[in-house]
Image (cartoon, rainbow, N blue to C red):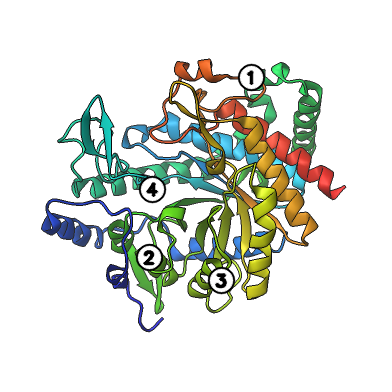
Amino acid sequence: MSNWSPTSWKEYSYKQAASYPDEHQLDRVVEQLSHMPPLVTHGEIKQLKKAIALAGRGEAFILQGGDCAESFDDCRSEIISNKLKIILQMSLVLLHGMRKPIIRVGRIAGQYAKPRSSDFETIDGITLPSYRGDLVNSQQFDAQSRIPNPKLLLQGYSCAAMTLNYIRALVTGGFADLNHPQQWDLRFVDHSSQASDYHAIVDAIADSLDFLESIDGIKNSSINKVDFYTSHEALHLHYEQALTRKINDEWYDLSTHLPWIGMRTAQLDSAHLEFLRGVQNPIGVKVGPGATREWLTELLNAANPHKEEGKVLLITRLGAQNIAQLLPNIIETVKATNIPVTWSCDPMHGNTETTADGTKTRHFDNILSELQQAMSIHNDMDSYLGGVHFELTGENVTECIGGARGLNAQDLKYAYHSLVDPRLNYEQSLEMAIQLSRAFKQKTI
């Protein structure tokens, strides 16, 4: 790493970069951020890396989920607590079915920047720069709002800090008790053809918790305490650079525990790969249908030359129609490198579709199908599916179709609030966890 520095990324191809009209102001903001306290600690990052290594060996499972793009306006107590609640509840369902530790990772406290397929968008004949997330510009469709504003980096840092502070207070203050099924909203269960199975799983979880709490000392022990980590796409490299610090001769990106690289920025000459290869954080890499053997081999050698367990989380996003054809070759390619990775499945992005009126959505059945196929393929190839990566919310939005309530395209108009991509709502997320738990249990019996 002798040729690496927190700014060496500037010599590489910086895809998805915002075009700031005042570069000097951007530099001043980055300098200001570089003196702010970090958002996470290097000890937490090292702990997560060890946990990801366990998942890579099939000894734990990663549940990663949250908004496709966070909004500064959603930096509110009820929004944050609802996101945390659904992830905690899903993790308990998975723990019950998988019988292994669940590593909880939120797409939260930093998911403020989003890649776009085009630099511009046109509405009613007016063309303006694309919305790139609250960290860059505003979603309002007017010329002034779409100008990239460096001061938004400071606002993003503040929202991330407040969100993290509240999450830590909830986790250490007994909020994990909300895991109890007696407090869950399970009204959707009765709409499912598998209602009896769902009730049996939830009742079994409740019975297990009641038993543990009946044993003296268990109630106040670690059962009510959880580890919770944050993640976001490391898209805005000025922000990541500003929060990168040197500790004991090693560099850590202290904006988050788990930064990842998306498909649009994972080229071998990309600034994003150059930046993340030099930090000690575990890093995620999205792998799509266009992945080649040569690209994947070179990427792993660049990202993890020392073959460190827990360093790289490969997140496949192939689509329910493509995964059976593509995933086996990807697994074989990685095995041939002898570089350890932890596998995760993103069943959301490869299954995006558009309704007749142009609304982006995803179907519950396709999401579940890709997950089930991923589990089977890894199992057949003597590999481990070590995690799942969802776009979800703790709110009852209507953005994805299907699920127990049978949401259809006409229902999307009632509560479609996503800034960019459709998310599973509270009920769909919990149902997905139940289905995944059942599938995993059937594979291991």
Q: Nearer the viewer, residue 90 or 179?
A: 90
Residue 97 percent across, percent down from the top left: 77, 42
Of circles 1 and 3, the one toward us is 3
Image: 304 above or below 166: below
- Earlier in the chain: of badge 4 and badge 2, it is 4
Mark 2, residue position: 270
Q: Secondary structure at mark 2?
A: loop
Instruction: Please tell me in which quadrant of the rendered image residue 132 appears.
Output: top left
The reply to whether callout 2 and callout 3 are in contact (CB within 8 Å) is no
Residue at 19% in and 35% down: 145
- Earlier in the chain: of badge 1 and badge 3, it is 3
- Mark 2 is on which residue type? Ser
- Earlier in the chain: of badge 2 and badge 3, it is 2
- Mark 3 is on which residue type? Thr
Q: Secondary structure at mark 4?
A: loop
Residue at 32% in and 53% down: 16
Residue at 28% in and 62% down: 242
- Mark 4 is on which residue type? Gly
Disc 4 residue crowd, few under 14, some 14–19, many 20+, Cα 10 Å: many
Mark 1, residue position: 406
Residue 30 percent across, percent down from the top left: 22, 59
Residue at 15% in and 59% down: 28
Of circles 2 and 1, the one toward us is 2
